[in-house]
Amino acid sequence: MLLNNFLEQSAARLPQKVALVCPDQSYTYLEIETQANCLANMFIQTGVKKQDRIAIYLGNSAEAVISIFAALKAGAVFTLVNPAIKPNKLAYLLTNSGAKALVTDSRKFAGIREVCVGLDDLDTIILTGQAGGSPILNKKILFWEDILATCFSEPLEPLCINIDLASIIYTSSTTGKAKGVMLTHLNMVSASTSITQYLQNIEEDVILNVLPLSFDYGLYQVLMAFKMGATLILEKSFIYPYPVIEKLVKHRVTGFPLVPTIVSILMQLKDLAKYDFSSLRYLTNTAQAISPRQTNELQRIFPTARFYSMYGLTECKRVSYLPPEQLVKRPTSVGKAMPNIETYLVDENGTRITEPGKIGELVVRGSNVMQGYWKLPEETAKKLKTGLYPWERQLNTGDLFKLDEEGYLYFISRKDDIIKSAGEQVSPKELEDVLYEMKDIVEAAVIGKPDEILGQAIKAVVVLQETSDLTAEDIIRHCSRNVESYMIPKYVEIVKELPKTTTGKMSKKDL
C-alpha cells in the first residue's frame, strides 16, 4: 500500500463524507481527492519527476492537506516546513532538500521572494490565497485557484512502490542544522496502521488536531483519520483555547491529541465543568512526558476519555504506548512496544539488558524505522546499526530507559540530558515528577548548570499558578523531603513561562 491510498480508498468508499473541517469550512473526501488530483497533474505538467521533493510552507489548512496527497500522487516526496521559521532557515531547508516545487501562501511570498530567487533547484512556486505579487523571472509562479479551475482531475496511475520515499521530515540537531528524516511509504503506512490499531480508530471517529502539520505528531492525525475514513477538525493552534474547546463539543470529538503545553493550559482554565465532553473517547500524549498529577487532572476534566501515554521519535514515528487500564498501576510508564514493533535495551557495549531496573539505551526494530538522514551518512551511521539479522538495520534511539519486572518501559532521559553532579547521575524527569507533585507548579524543567565543585549543579526552573505565593525555599524543602540529597536543586528559578519550540516541546537548550 502507498500512503496516498489512504485518501483514495476513503474517497472511493465514502465520497460524500466530511473528511476535513478547516477552519469553519467542510471538505468531503471526494472534494479533497479531486483537488489533490488537479494539483498532482499540475506538478507533473511543470516537470516534477518521481522522487523529486516538494516543500509545503503553509500553516494548518486545507491547502496543506491537499498538497501532501498531491505530492504523493505525483510520485514526489513532500516536506512540510513550519510556517513560523525565518527566511534564512527556509532557504537552508529548500537548498538541502533540493526542492523542485514550493507551495506557500501569497502573503508569505513577499518575505521569501529574495530567498527563492537564488535557489537553483526550485523551479515552480504555487501560491494560495489572493493572486498577486511580482513575478520572479527564473521561476514559474502559479496560483492555487487557477490550478483547480484548469487542471485535469483524473487520477494518476501509481508512480511509486512502497519502498520509495514519501516524506522528508526535518528535525532539530545538536549541530544546529536541521536533519531530514527519510521515510518511505512503507515506513509511514506501517506506523499509521499500528497506531490506529491500538487506539482502536474507526471511521466514526472525529479527531481534533491543533498541532502543526510540520510536527509529525500533527501530520499523522491527518494520515490516520484519512486511513480510517474518519473526520478531522483542523485548528491552527491552542493559543486561544475556548474556541477550540467549543469546537470539541460542537463536533462531538472522539479523539484529542495533546502535548504538555496544551495540558498546562487546560489545567489553568477554571470553568471547564460546564462543557459536555461525553463524546471524547481517547486522549493521547507524546513529545514529552506529563506528570501523574497532570494525568489525574486530565481524567477529572475528561472523565469519559481513555488516556494513552506514548513515546516516539521522528526517526520511527512511534515506539510504545501504555494501555489506559495500566495507568493507575504504572503512572510513569510509557508502556510496551506498539503492534509490529520490537524494542529492547542495550548497555554501553551493545549487550542486551534483561534485568529489571537496569538503565540502558532503547533499540527499536520495525518497518517504521527511517531510511536514514538526508545527505548525512555519518549521522545516519550513528543511529542505524546492524540489526539482530544481517538484512536489517535497527534504530538506536539515544534515549535511556529501564524496564520493570513485567517488561514495561520507563523513560529516564536522553543521553545528553543526564546531569552528572558530584559523581552521581541525575535523571531530570525523575526530579521534574517530584516538582509536579506541588499543586502550584504548572510547568517544571530541570537542567544542569556548570559548577567548579559539583561538575554540574542541579537547577529547577518552574512556572507557578498566577495566584501562588510559593517560594524557591518552599520548593527546595519539598525536594529535600522527597529525593536523595544529591538530587536536591542547588538553584530554583521562578519564571512566567518556559521557552518552547514551535511544536510545543520544552526547549531546555534555551534555559
Image (cartoon, rainbow, N blue to C red):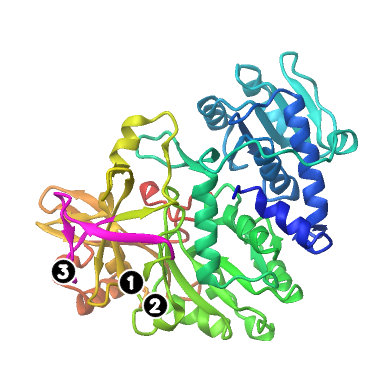
Q: Is residue 254 visible?
A: yes
x, y percent for residue 371: 42, 40
**Disc 2 or disc 3, which is closer to the eye?**
3
Q: In the rendered structure, which disc, 1 or 2, sits on the residue that comes first in sequence?
A: 2
Residue type (three-letter) at the residue carrying disc 3: Glu
Q: Position of residue 230 (x, y in %)?
A: 69, 65
Residue 472 inside the magenta-drawn segment: no
Return the mark for residue 355: 3
Q: Circle 2 is placed at which residue position?
A: 292
Q: On the image, which quarter does residue 434 sit in?
A: bottom left
In the displayed structure, 474 sits above or below 66; it is below
Sequence-wise, the earlier of marks 2 and 3 is 2
Q: Are marks 1 and 2 in contact (CB under 8 Å)?
A: yes
Tell me what residue is drawn at x 42 percent, y 65 percent.
338
Task: Magenta stretch: give its range.
Answer: 339-362
Kindly report the distance in space between the C-alpha atoms of the residues bearing marks 3 and 1: 24 Å
Mark 3: few/some/many CA within 10 Å (<14, 14-19, 20+) = few
Instruction: Identify which amino acid the numbered label 2 is placed on.
Output: Pro
User: Could you tell me which secondary element the residue under label 2 belongs to?
Assistant: helix
